Amino acid sequence: MQSKDKILVVGGYGQVGRVICKDLGNKFPGNVVAVGRNYDKAEQFTRTTNGKVIPLEFDVFADNNNNNILEEISVVVMCLDLNDTRFIEQCIDKGIHYVDISASYSFLSKIMSLDEKAKASGSTIILSVGLSPGLTNLLVQYSKTQFDVLHRSDIFVLLGLGEEHGKAAIEWMVDNMHTTFEVSENGYKKQVKSLEDGKATLFSENFGNRIAYRFNFAEQHFLPVTLDIKRVSHRICFDSRLVTQSLAAFRKLGILNLLKLKPLRNAAVKMFENIQFGSDAYVIKVDSSGKKDDKITEFKCSVIGRNQSEATGKVAAVITESIYIKKHPSGVYHIEQIFNSSDIIDRLSEHIKFHTYDK
């Protein structure tokens, strides 16, 4: 019988996957497998790890029902955007644990529907693992500890344009610039539009006050349920005020609707791939209000760091390590339902700066 002691990192030689593989490879040398459709790229990357990470050619989008690689796997870390849940269900059927860094609300909802199946097989599935969703969820969880009752959390994310991003992440961003989506506020459904409904917040000394705009990040849909909050919103801006304000203006004028046309959408993706100005910094800020000692009060906190891809990888590596070495409840969970915000933030203290704001 084969030993189920391997960690399979799908997309392991990509920008986020490399971080995950290196971190886990240093702790579990020889048990981490970087997989993708291009063996040469996988092998080229794993050479930089001195054999701690193993290369493997594996196409997660193909029909893998008869692929024996899963017989050796304890945990799968998914760094790619899947089209459906077939592969995840194969993992669940074999009792494999699963960590996903996807930011897509619709796809995460599909994975959540596998909860009973995962509980029956003994698989632990962790979603919302990364920067946003991920660290954002944990900051809201931490904020809740400051109240007797948390009424509202507004999430703000400032992203640097100077960092090189993976194509999939850019495509997701571009595809969501012209969307209308539904959120829950005080128990009622509300339609909101991406890059509208601007709201100002103080991010940090370096970035000061910025206006951020609504965007369809997944956590604002799930956190009202997982943390029992009446209202959660999510807004985004960039380190370039010009880019942020221009996109908001284009949205208001209806110009971003042209991104529905494939040639223009592809051109926009290419443009963002080639942007070379700005920093690689990011700031996650959460402004919350609620009741403490029968008084309405506020609490604000943030995480500041550099290199969004690295941050996502670091969070995923910490969560995967815990799933690999410890027993956790089976079923499908978001990060804040299983892990303690203070513990994860402490583990990442070399890479991020946690900050609270004076009232």
Image (spheres, rainbow, N blue to C red):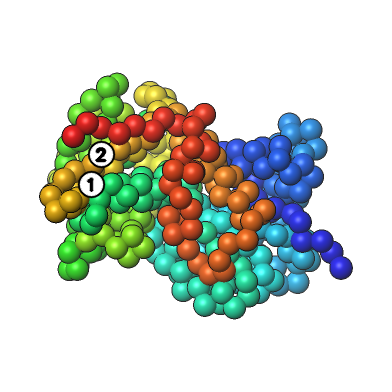
Q: Residue furthest left?
A: 295
State whether residue 94 is above or below residue 341. Answer: below
Residue 304 in percent (x, y) is at: 38, 31
Q: Residues within 10 Å of mark 2 (few under 14, many from 20)?
A: many
Judging by the rendered image, the residue that carries numbered circle 1 is: 288
- Asked whether residue 339 appears in the rendered view, the answer is yes
The three-letter amino acid code for the residue at tag 1 is Ser
Residue occupying the far front of the picture: 293
Quadrant hosting residue 40: top right
* Mark found first going from the N terminus, 1 or 2: 1
**Which residue is more in the foreground, 257 or 306?**
306
- Write down the residue under mark 2: 300
Q: In which image quadrant can residue 247 be found? A: top left
Quadrant assignment for the N terminus: bottom right
Q: Label 2 near label 1: C-beta < 8 Å?
A: yes
Secondary element under disc 1, as helix, strand or loop, is strand
160 on left or right of 180: right
Q: Observer-nearest residue: 255 or 249?
A: 249
Mark 1 and mark 2: Cα distance apart in space: 6 Å
Residue 284 point in image, percent of width and height: 34, 38
Residue 334 is left or right of residue 194, and the answer is right
Q: In which quadrant is the C terminus drawn?
A: top left
- Asked if 302 appears above or below 55 in the picture, the reply is above
Looking at the image, residue 176 sits to the left or right of residue 15; the answer is left
Q: Amino acid at mark 2?
A: Lys
Residue at image coords 74%, 54%:
6
Residue at 23 percent of width and 25 percent of height: 208
Left/right placement of residue 341 relative to residue 199 reads: right
The quarter of the picture where residue 190 lies is bottom left
